[in-house]
Image (cartoon, rainbow, N blue to C red):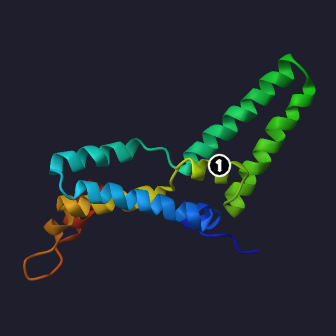
Amino acid sequence: MMLPATNRRAENHTSEEINREIARQTQQRIAYYTTKSPQEISERIRELDYEWDIERALESNASALAFSGIVLAATVNKKWLILPGLVTGFLFQHALQGWCPPLPILRRLGFRTAAEINEERYALKALRGDFERIISRDGVYGDHHAAFAAAQQ
């Protein structure tokens, strides 16, 4: 059995309509920043550092539900243990296949993958001019330190 690539598995299990809408919104945000100052672009990049990706949303959702099930089992009825059992099973399925029941809901709510967030981040860095510093005027690439520094900003 071949496991899907980690970087695109959530997108692969999301409807094309939702993927297109997420991409459209990202492109609109990038277009908005084409007329903004480097400081405003930097602020947006800082905001992206705090945006929750789909993996973080799924993990927090699963852990909250599993913990709730354990508390309910301890205080109300042992039958509540089925909840953490189901949730951890779905989380394991997501780890292997890239799909679980909350995925379509969270994607529809606009949660993006880390790759989608990084696409916006690097487009904004290009607008800000970060990558111009690693290419000399004659088109020859600069050193690896400059490239690494541009990618980290």
Residue at 49% x, 44% y: name it.
Answer: 52
Question: At 15% from the left edge and 81% from the top edge, which residue is drawn?
Answer: 140
Q: Tell me the quarter of the image containing the N terminus.
A: bottom right
Depicted 23 relative to depicted 142: above or below: above
Up-down: is 72 above or below 5? above
Q: Quadrant of residue 88?
A: top right
Secondary structure at badge 1 equals helix
Farthest residue to the left: give it: 137
Residue 116 in the image: state x and y as whole percent.
45, 60
The answer to whether residue 115 is visible is no
Q: Residue at x 62, y 67 (%)?
A: 12
Picture coordinates of residue 27, whole percent (x, y):
36, 61
The number of callouts visible is 1
Confirm whether residue 34 shows in the render.
yes
Choose between 123 and 95: the one closer to the eye.
Answer: 123
Point out residue 147 in the picture as x, y percentages from the top left corner.
24, 66
Please give the name of the residue rendered at 92% of the width and 29% of the height, measured from the top-left corner. 79
Q: Is residue 13 left or right of residue 24?
A: right
**The image quarter in which residue 29 lies:** bottom left
Q: Amino acid at mark 1?
A: Ile
- Left/right placement of residue 8 relative to residue 34 reads right
| Left or right: 57 as drawn, with respect to 48 | right
Q: Position of residue 20 (x, y in %)?
A: 50, 65
Q: Is residue 78 above or below residue 34?
A: above
Residues 143 and 112: in front is: 112
Residue of label 1 = 105
Badge 1: how crowded within 10 Å, few (<14), some, or many (20+)? few
